[in-house]
Image: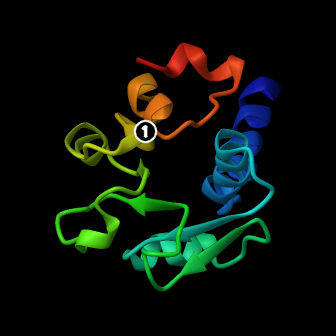
Amino acid sequence: MKSIILILLLSIVLLSDDNYELKLYQSLLPALFQKKSLIVYTQESEQKDILKNSLILELSSSCSNSDLIIGKSFDELSTECLNKPIFATSYRSYINAQNSFGAFYWSKGRPQIQFKLEVIKTYNLHLPQNLYKYAK
């Protein structure tokens, strides 16, 4: 009975933390790009809400001066964005976006993270050794 209550309390604490995606981005992306701060472009209001509280990741209103693009829909990107590295937030966009080097998304209620080594090499990014198990 005590273990069930403990698990329930831990679940409530973990689920109440709305900044888990921001924490992931802030630890992962600067390590990949080997920069202390990054300029990020996104068209999605959900991602803008997540990134607005970051001290490391700066939102850009234009793709041309950004280091990377984050989101789940890349169908309407301007031509200046076509050569930017992409971090996807859905499996479908991860698979379909040619410049997608990685993704964080949910599948069957579980968080998933994946990386494409070929695209990482193309953009001269540096995947930390402990994340190679998530790379293809």
Image quadrant occupied by the C terminus? top left
Quarter of the image where one finds residue 119: top left
Q: Amino acid at mark 1?
A: Phe
Q: In the image shown, does 104 or 4 lie closer to the viewer?
A: 104
Label 1, secondary structure: give it.
Answer: strand
Q: Is residue 100 left or right of residue 69?
A: left
The N terminus, quarter of image:
top right
* Residue at x 71% of width, y 76% of height: 53
Q: Residue shown at 52%/77% (left/top)?
A: 48
Residue 82 image-quadrant placement: bottom left
Q: Please give the name of the residue rendered at 76% of the width and 65% of the height, measured from the top-left corner.
A: 56
Residue pushed farthest bottom? 61
Q: Residue 113, can we see it?
A: no
Reply above or below: 10 against 118. Answer: below
Which of 115 and 39 lies nearest the eye of the viewer? Answer: 39
Q: Position of residue 68 (x, y in %)?
A: 50, 59
> Which residue bears the numbered disc 1?
101
Q: Relative to 41, say whether 92 is above or below.
A: above
- Report x, y in % for residue 49: 55, 78
